[in-house]
Amino acid sequence: MEKNKNKLTSFKDHLDQEYGKTGTETRETYEQEFEAFKLGAMLQELRKEKGMTQEQLAQKCGTTKTYISRIENNASDIRLSTLMRIVQVGLGGHLNLNVSM
């Protein structure tokens, strides 16, 4: 009986297999959705670190609890001006943007 050998795959190779190579439409869609997910998770973590509810954050930065929830759960696109207001006014932070090529 032959043993089943588990082969380890790098995360990049896994992404290539599941979503296609970098530059393909499917992979680009995945990358964009993952960035939106990371942003929502980061905002949620920062809000919780501040001991704020979604309602409190929404009131502080002039939006709704529903909108904050949608951002945190990756269900909504977010405008840059709104993101800046959430980070600066709502969370008391500074937003730094980075573009990589």
Image (cartoon, rainbow, N blue to C red):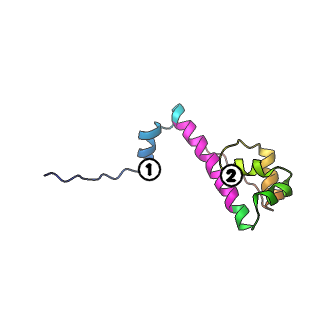
The numbered mark at residue 96 is none
Pick the residue in front: 53 or 15. 53
Give x and y (percent) for residue 83: 77, 49
Q: Residue at x 84, y 54 (%)?
A: 61
Left or right: residue 5 versus residue 67 is left
Helix, strand or loop status at disc 1: helix
Q: Amino acid at mark 2?
A: Glu
In magenta stretch: residue 41: yes
Give x and y (percent) for residue 88: 81, 57
Counting residues from the start of the chain, the first of labels 2 and 1 encountered is 1
Does 70 appear above or below 49? Answer: above
The numbered mark at residue 11 is 1
Q: Which residue is mark 2?
A: 72
Left or right: residue 28 versus residue 7 is right
Left or right: residue 9 versus residue 49 is left
> In the rendered structure, which segment of residues is drawn in magenta?
27-45
Q: Is residue 23 visible?
A: no
Q: Residue at x 71, y 67 (%)?
A: 49
Pick the residue in front: 100 or 69. 69
Separation of marks 2 and 1 at Cα, in angstroms = 25 Å
